[in-house]
């Protein structure tokens, strides 16, 4: 039994995630003409104004981790909204519940299907801890939740390079990566 079969058995729900998906190759961008925005060579415009030293101070800082989890049960969002604190539900504006906790300081989006999106964590461990806390809150309301398919979807980090980045020239030189 492979992972997709196990997932379907765990949740007892057949969805699009259990069917194989075919990935498309990335589009080729090497043939796209890119206009020059300067008379100087693009290499000289991307170089830092001050030479970079081997400074270990250039460390990326995580700002946000976004993750998802499947609770494997249909949720009555109105019931959850009335029985929990720090939750907002306005079905005319958004089809899910927005719920917040203080530690770790995160926000969750809960949907009727049992899917949950967690945002605002500063690292992966806090994201998983927050997801478990939200699942426990929903469980206490009276739903038979399971914690299935936790996955980090996105991580945002920042780093001070100590020189300006000329985005147009960076794209001109390395457009195949965009």
Image: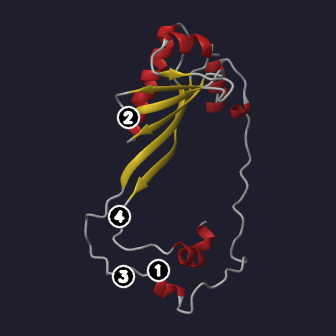
Q: Is residue 92 above or below residue 61?
A: above
What x and y, as percent, mark residue 158? 40, 57
Q: Secondary structure at mark 3?
A: loop
Label 2 neighbourhood size at 10 Å, few (<14), some (14-19), many (20+)?
some
Judge from the rendering whether residue 94 lies leftward or rightward of residue 138; answer left or right.
right
| Gap between marks 2 and 3 measured at Cα | 37 Å
Judge from the rendering whether residue 6 lies leftward or rightward of residue 60; answer left or right.
right
| Gap between marks 1 and 2 measured at Cα | 36 Å
- Residue holding disc 1: 46
- Along the polypeptide, which appears first: circle 4 or circle 2? 2
| Gap between marks 1 and 4 measured at Cα | 16 Å
- Along the polypeptide, which appears first: circle 1 or circle 4? 1
Please identify the quarter of the rendering in which residue 53 is found.
bottom left
Q: For the point 42% across and 53% down, which residue is it? A: 157
| Gap between marks 4 and 2 measured at Cα | 24 Å
Please state which of the two labelled residues, at mark 2 or mark 3, is closer to the viewer. 3
- Residue holding disc 2: 126
- Along the polypeptide, which appears first: circle 4 or circle 3? 3
- Along the polypeptide, which appears first: circle 2 or circle 3? 3
What x and y, as percent, mark residue 149? 55, 30
- Residue holding disc 4: 160
Q: Is residue 114 above or below residue 61?
A: above
- Residue holding disc 3: 49
Q: Nearer the viewer, residue 87 or 49?
A: 87
| Gap between marks 4 and 3 measured at Cα | 14 Å
**4 and 2 marks in contact (CB < 8 Å):** no
**1 and 4 marks in contact (CB < 8 Å):** no
Q: Nearer the viewer, residue 109 or 19?
A: 109
């Amino acid at each position: 039994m492979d992972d997709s079969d196990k997932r379907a058995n765990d949740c007892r729900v057949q969805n699009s995630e259990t069917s194989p998906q075919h990935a498309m190759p990335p589009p080729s961008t090497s043939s796209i003409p890119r206009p020059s925005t300067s008379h100087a060579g693009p290499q000289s415009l991307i170089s830092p104004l001050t030479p970079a030293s081997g400074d270990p101070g250039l460390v990326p800082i995580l700002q946000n981790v976004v993750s998802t989890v499947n609770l494997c049960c249909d949720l009555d969002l109105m019931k959850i909204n009335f029985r929990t604190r720090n939750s907002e539900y306005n079905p005319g504006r958004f089809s899910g519940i927005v719920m917040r906790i203080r530690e770790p300081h995160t926000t969750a989006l809960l949907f009727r299907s049992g899917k949950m999106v967690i945002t605002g964590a500063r690292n992966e461990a806090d994201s998983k801890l927050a997801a478990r806390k939200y699942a426990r809150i929903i469980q206490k309301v009276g739903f038979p939740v399971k914690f299935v398919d936790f996955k980090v979807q996105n991580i945002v980090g920042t780093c001070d390079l100590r020189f300006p980045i000329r985005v147009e020239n960076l794209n001109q030189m390395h457009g195949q990566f965009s």
